[in-house]
Image: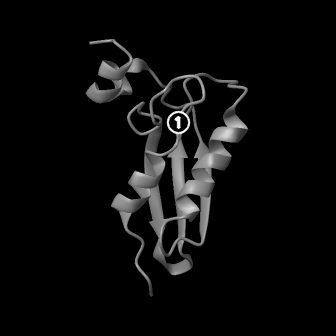
Amino acid sequence: MAQINEAEVMDALRECYDPEIPVNIVDLGLVYGIDIQEEDASVNVTMTLTAIGCPMAGEVIEEVESRVKQVENVQNCKVDLTFDPPWSPERMTEDAKWELGMI
């Protein structure tokens, strides 16, 4: 059975950007978790958005699924959107805060 590399999945997620903020979704703190299912070569991504009702939600989810499916040995990707806990700027990495001029 082929292994899915978690670091490669995270790298793929770092290629996905919030459409309104020029920072990737990992550094923004939007990714709450990834669950790799080796038996069916799938990855489930639990994530949130910066705002409930984001008009770009569909595009963000499509991009996440598309990027993760490009990772070696990944056959399928499913995004579970949650707003619990709600996103807040405290979830951002220091790099993201620097990029946005918050530090």
Q: Looking at the picture, how far across and down is residue 89, in whole percent?
A: 40, 19
Q: Circle 1 sits on which residue?
A: 17
Q: Looking at the picture, how far across and down is residue 44, in whole percent?
A: 54, 58
Q: How many marks?
A: 1
Q: Amino acid at mark 1?
A: Tyr
- At x 50%, y 76%, the residue is 73
User: Left or right: 60 with respect to 9?
Assistant: right
- At x 45%, y 87%, the residue is 1
In the displayed structure, 90 sits above or below 12; it is above
Task: Pick whichever, 43 or 74, lies toward us.
Answer: 74
User: Left or right: 12 with respect to 58?
Assistant: left
Rendered image quadrant of residue 100: top left
Rendered image quadrant of residue 95: top left
Residue closest to the far top: 102
Q: Looking at the picture, how far across and down is residue 49, in whole percent?
A: 57, 30
- At x 47%, y 72%, the residue is 72
How crowded pointer 1 is (Cα within 10 Å; few <14, some 14-19, many 20+) is rated as: some
User: Left or right: 100 with respect to 37?
Assistant: left
Colouring of the image: one colour
- Disc 1, SS: loop
- At x 61%, y 54%, the residue is 65
The quadrant of the picture occupied by the C terminus is top left
